[in-house]
Image: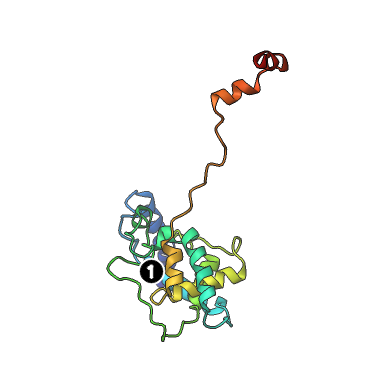
Amino acid sequence: MKKYVIVFIAGIFLVPAAFFLYLRSGYAPVSTSASPLPFERFFANLAMRATMSHELPKTDPGPPTENELVSGAHIYRENCSVCHGLPNESQSAISKGMYPHPPQFFRPDRPTAYDPNRPFRPANPKAYWKVKNGVRLTGMPGFKGSFTEQQIWQVSQFMGNARNLPPAVVAVLESKPEEPQQTASVSKPHQHAASKRTPASASSTLQ
């Protein structure tokens, strides 16, 4: 019996020690292009499901209106599109270089369609949680310190209806940012010269 206890205690120390040496060896994958660590996805998903099981919102505002989808589209375009894509645009270099790869809500081979007879879907509680809290070690930020509760719901509702967006919402996504207009007028050289004339020189000119 004593032998088994010694083996058990030795195993408790050997496993963490072996893992530590593996990390110190320099062979552990840490770049975004490398394969994941053994059981990395399993443990990450396990922790995510356990956390969401008691932190997901208990209520939701229900299906969105078109105006709420428009508001969500503005938020998405300004803050999310660089990673999650836009209609009829290829995946950004930032998105391609991330790991885990962020989901693409829009792809060139899957054009956005709209069915006016199809009701809008309520926001996915999991999407709401991810927008609000972010996901550690994935590049997904949390916006609870930047967005209002209403804005978090609006962008979550937008993402839940990305396959069925009205034309007004698609127009927000496809709109180009306005360039600042140059309002300062350029004075002409002769205007500067005229402004520098003294009353005496002006009167002499009239004479």
Q: Residue at x 41, y 73 (%)?
A: 162
Query: Closest to the observer: 88 or 18?
Result: 88
The residue positioned farthest toward the front in the image shown: 207
The residue positioned farthest toward the right in the image shown: 199
Residue 184 visible in rendering? yes
Q: In this rendering, is residue 186 above or below 205?
A: below
Tell me residue 50's x, y (percent): 49, 76
Q: Residue at x 45, y 85 (%)?
A: 119
Q: In this rendering, is residue 183 above or below 93?
A: above
Residue 2 visible in rendering? no
Tell me residue 114's x, y (percent): 38, 78
Residue where numbered disc 1 is placed: 105
Q: Residue at x 48, y 62 (%)?
A: 136
Tell me the crowding category of disc 1: few under 14, some 14 to 19, or many 20 or more residues within 10 angstroms, Cα based: some
Quadrant of image for the C terminus? top right
* Local SS, label 1: loop
- Callout 1, which amino acid? Phe
